[in-house]
Image (cartoon, helix red, strand yellow):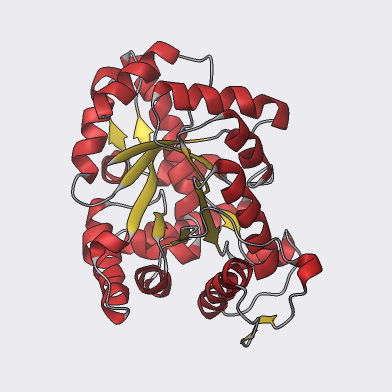
Amino acid sequence: MKLDTMLPPAALGDVPKLARAAEDLGFDGLWTAETSHDPYLPLALAAEHTSRVDLGTSIAVAFPRSPLVHAQIAWDLQAQSKGRFILGLGTQVKGHNERRFGIAWHAPGPRLREMIVAIRAIWDCWQNDTRPRFEGEHYRFTLMTPFFNPGPIAHPKIPIYIAGVNTYMCRLAGELCDGFHVHPFHSIRYLREHLLPEVEDGLAKSGRRRSDLTLSTSAFVITGATAAEIERARDAVRMQIAFYASTRAYVRVLETHGWGDAGTRLTEKAAKGDWAGMAREITDEMLDVYAVTASHDEIAAKVRAKYDGILDRVAFYVPFQAGADVDRWKRIVAAFH
C-alpha cells in the first residue's frame, strides 16, 4: 500500500518547496484537487522540482474542459514528469457544473465514459499517428493536422483514474480505468458491500482482474499529540463529514448503516446554512465508522490496518504542510512504510 499526500491549496510560487518536501519525506504520490486553484498548473512545477513521487489530479473536474484539453495538458505533464503523471477526473455534482462552472448538465456517467474513450483516441493519434475518427453522442474527434499534433512521447501510457460513489461510476472504473479515487466519505462496510462488488462487475465485463485497477482514497483521520488536539480534530472532521453527507448523491454511504434520515436532515440544514446544526447530526458512532482516530504515534498503523487488503493507495485528508510538524510527518511516513 502506498502513502500519498494532498498538495494544499497554495500559490504557485510555493509549490516547488511543498513538492520537494513531500518527496523528501518519502510520500509515494502527490495529488492536487480542483478547489480554489486549478489542479493542473501546480503539477507542472511539482514535476520540475521532483524526480520520484507520482503526480496526479484528485480530481480535475471533467466537463468544463473538452477531451482534447484534458488530453493535451496530461500529455505535457506526462512528458515533463518523465512518466509520473496520473490523470484523475471527476464529474462533480449538478449544482456546481451549472451554477459554478456555467455548463449544461447531461447524464454524467455515459458522458464521462465517452470522455475517457475520446481522450485515449487522441493520445493514440499523437503517439501512433492513427486517424482521428472518434464520434460519440457528446464529443467528436475527427480532425488533427500536423500543426496541432504534439507528436509521440517517451511514456505514452498515462493512467486515468475517475472518482465516484454510486454504482455506475464504480462499474465504469472497473471496466475502463486504471484507477478509482474512492471518495473520502466512505466506510469499510460501504466498500465491501457496494463499491468492491460493483468494481468487480466492471472488471469482469472487460475481462480484467482486481490487480489491473488501483484503488486510492484520502482518508479522514482524527489525530493529535494530546487529548485536546484530538478533540479539536474531531470537531473539524465532524464538520467535513457533515458537509459531504449533506449531498444527496452520497446518501447511500449513510444508508449502508441505516442513517439515511440523517442525510435528509443534513440536506435541509445545508440549504438553510445551519452549519452548527449539521455538525450535531454527525454522532460519535458515525465518526468511528467514517474516520480513523489515534495519536500521532499510532495513526499510521491504524490507517494501514483499516485499509489493508482493500485499497492500494491512501492519503490523509489533512494535507502535509512543508515546514509544519516535519518530524511528526517523518515518523508517520516511516511507520506506514
In the image, residue 267 lies at what x, y percent? 52, 59
153 lies above or below 144? above
Q: Is residue 257 left or right of residue 277?
A: left
Say which residue appears at 36% left-offset and 17% top-offset.
330
In the image, residue 304 lies at what x, y percent? 23, 37
* Pick the front one: 80 or 23: 80
39 lies above or below 46? below
The answer to whether residue 247 is seen in the rendering is: yes
The answer to whether residue 220 is seen in the rendering is: no
* Pick the front one: 39 or 45: 45
Say which residue appears at 65% left-offset and 40% top-offset.
44
Question: Which of the image's four quarters has the N terminus?
Answer: top left
Q: How many marks?
A: 0
Q: Is residue 332 left or right of residue 94?
A: left
* Pick the front one: 146 or 230: 146
Report which quarter residue 99 is drawn in: bottom right
In the image, residue 232 lies at what x, y percent? 42, 23
Report which quarter residue 104 is drawn in: bottom right
In the image, residue 76 lies at what x, y percent? 65, 51
Say which residue appears at 35% left-offset and 42% top-offset.
314
